[in-house]
Image: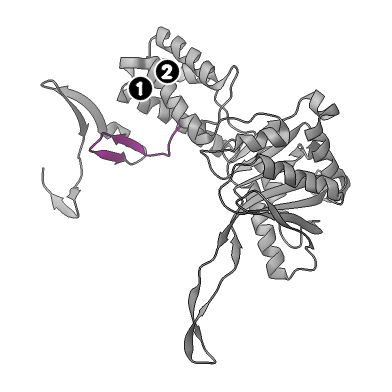
Amino acid sequence: MNEKEIGEIRRRYRANKNNIHRVCGCFVNEQKEIISEFDQSLGLMSEEEADQILTVLRKALSGGVGRNLLEVEFTTAQVMESEEHRLLSELRGSELKDGESVHALYEKIVSSLEFQGNYVILLVHDRYDIFSYSADGEKGDSSEVFSYVLCCICPVKEGKPALSYYLPGKCFRSIGTDTMIAPPALGFMFPAFEDHSANIYKAWYYTKDLTDSHEELVTALFQGEIPMPAAEQQVTFGSVLEQAMEEDCNLRVVRSVQSQVRQMVEAHKEEKKEEPLVLTKEEAGDMLRYCGVPEERVTVFEEKYEEAFGKDAQLPPGNLVAGKALRVKTPEVAIQVTPGCGDLVETRVIDGVKYILVRADGEVVVNGVNVHI
């Protein structure tokens, strides 16, 4: 699945575009107890309620590939005979009409997930008629039906009482608010949608938090692995660079590597390629060579890169750098430089003292006051 295919499925979560008939789910308290289950018809809800449900579901297919949306792969053995794949297939095949399978999924999530506070599990099944198109763009017959399930795990927040003005009584009064469902924290889609077809060897896993993917849930649901969280990838990449370069890890090298990574991301966006952009160990090593880093340092970097991320790892470059701006910090000072202006900053040792120098070509403002240099 790529960004285009995810967007194609996400756009279905509108009142007039989906084939979702029912919304199943359960309410789980902070003691990990299922205190209620529900099975509602989407068609019998009001238009506003149905739209709110679809909006929540749609957010489990949001964010970036490799960041919020992570690919989970099943082995051939899992597809043929594993309990975890059998359960997902039963949910999909029965269109959530098999109550035992639905409840088994709830129990698996609740027993494994380490989550603070109450939450709601939402589960839907959808059927997507995939139509063929002629060379002139004319719509033809349905060539395939993509059947899949989508699951969301949404935190539940207790609303606070609010002060309201009651117009008929010409007075203020306090009104209470009920529990509110927040956007999904976690979720998954099975099977994956690839090349306008179902790929039962893959699922897509969603995490809102880039620092914690809840691997315990991934293990319980899929018995598989996902990449380390995006935020951890960034920290680890920086650590690998530091360890490999040692005393040669200077401002010029770091600025150049991060600039090259950002250029990769921007070029990929401009070219509008459908396949996700990835960075290999060899490509990262070439970036160091471009900076003039000695070959022995590059070799150490590639070894540590493999140790940290795994052999043949392919990482989303956007996960490895923090935004577009250059940020320079000491314990007492923080400097943020506009993207593309990193060459205004340099490091230097003057009379044995280390300095960060910022070239000031234009006006200089200190706490709102223009100052002269």
What is the crowding at mark 1: few (fewer than 14 residues within 10 Å), some, or many (at least 20)?
some
Quadrant that contains the N terminus = top right
- Residue type (three-letter) at the residue carrying disc 1: Val
**Residue behind mark 1:** 253
Helix, strand or loop for disc 1: helix
Residue 337 drawn at (x, y percent) = 31, 39
Specify whether residue 133 is in view.
no
Q: Residue at x 79, y 27 (%)?
A: 78
User: Can you tell which quarter of the image residue 101 is in?
Assistant: top right
Q: Residue at x 65, y 49 (%)?
A: 153
Q: Is residue 56 above or below residue 241?
A: below
Q: Is residue 46 above or below residue 327?
A: below
**Do the CB atoms of the residues marked 1 and 2 lie less than 8 Å apart?**
yes
**Residue behind mark 2:** 288
Q: Is residue 337 above or below residue 33?
A: above
Q: Residue at x 76, y 44 (%)?
A: 105
Helix, strand or loop for disc 2: helix
Q: Which residues are magenta?
A: 321-336
Query: In the rendered structure, does residue 326 fall within the stretch colored magenta?
Result: yes
Residue 117 drawn at (x, y percent) = 57, 52
- Residue type (three-letter) at the residue carrying disc 2: Leu
